[in-house]
Amino acid sequence: MENNSEKLNLTCNICGSSDTYFWFKKNSFNLYKCRKCGLIFTEPVSDVSGVYSEDYFSGAKDGFGYVDYDKDKQAMADTFDFYMNKIEEFSAGKGNLLDVGTATGYFLEIAKRRKWNVMGVEISVFAAEKARAKGLNVVTGKLENLSVPDKYFNVITFWDVIEHLSDLKSQLLLAHKMLKAGGLIAINTPDSGSFAAKLLGKHWHLLVPPEHLVIFNQKNLSLLLKSCGFNILWAGKVGKKFTLQYALQIAANKFNSNAIRQASEFLKNTFLGKIRIPINLKDNFLVIAKKS
């Protein structure tokens, strides 16, 4: 059962309700819920930029992150193509595309091959340097660190990013300012309103502070986007694929199992380790929205 005894006077950043309560503690962080819109959030939030060190992108020893970002993301190629198909379905044409939280630039390479003029922004110094080493235009930092004119981008993407941001509203307002008239924003994020999230409750694998600071559902994200000047064009569930080694590494960290960890290491750089496993718990959703 949920612990409703510690009701706090915290205001929900999405719907403005003060009907929020302490849910439980995980990884030494307090998680709270809003009764009105269902937002799950961490409070207080300190500087968590240190989470995105080299180990986050190549090791995942702390229980989150990636074994090897570029190799792990290869299993996501079909998903990224699906994202681009949806974007191009609603876009007036190809132009300037910005990827927020671009990591080492795997998605940017896909968009570039599809003839988009790409740019990325990434908070991790390590990942941004790796992206630039590939010849990609990637700025280290956040949206406010970009030196571009207003109404510059045709599309801005946030792939598995918004759950990491404690200041999402300000970032969306900046994105709105940077988009051309009729420009698109595309977001993929975990869905707290999904059956899997409700069934697993506190054991849902996407509750991982300080990596994930805010977890949305389709209702409250829609409210936020509208308040920032966006109209939703399309929303739906999206499945993903993961390499077998990545799945085993994350399982090893989650359950603190040396046996699973050894199996993951054994599969490293092997054909079996690269096998792509389709996983669709329907607990992620994609939103395409237009600047109004």
Image (cartoon, helix red, strand yellow):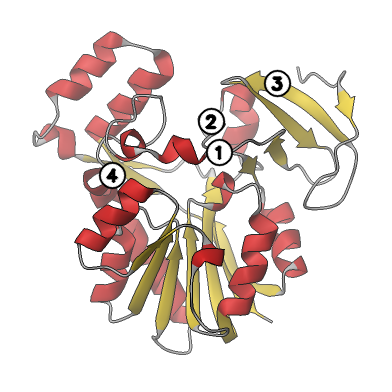
Residue placed most toward the observer, 276 or 122: 122
Residue placed most toward the observer, 278 or 187: 187
| Rendered residue at 84%/38% (across/down) | 35
Look at label 3 and name its amino acid: Phe
> Which residue position is annotated with label 1?
212
Q: Is residue 59 visible?
A: yes
Q: Earlier in the sequence, mark 3 or mark 4?
A: 3
> Which residue position is annotated with label 4?
69
Left or right: 6 in relation to 212: right
> Which residue position is annotated with label 2?
208
Q: Position of residue 141 (x, y in %)?
A: 47, 57
> Which residue position is annotated with label 3?
24
Farthest residue to the left: give it: 270
| Rendered residue at 74%/24% (across/down) | 23
Q: CA distance from mark 2 to mark 4?
A: 18 Å
Look at label 2 and name its amino acid: Val
Q: CA distance from mark 2 to mark 1?
A: 5 Å
Badge 1 marks a residue whose secondary structure is: loop
Q: Position of residue 57 (x, y in %)?
A: 32, 40
Look at label 1 and name its amino acid: His
Tell me whether the residue at label 2 lies in contact with that at label 3, contact meaning CB atoms closer than 8 angstroms.
no
Badge 3 crowding class, 10 Å Cα cut-off, few under 14, some 14 to 19, many 20 or more, is: some
Badge 4 marks a residue whose secondary structure is: helix
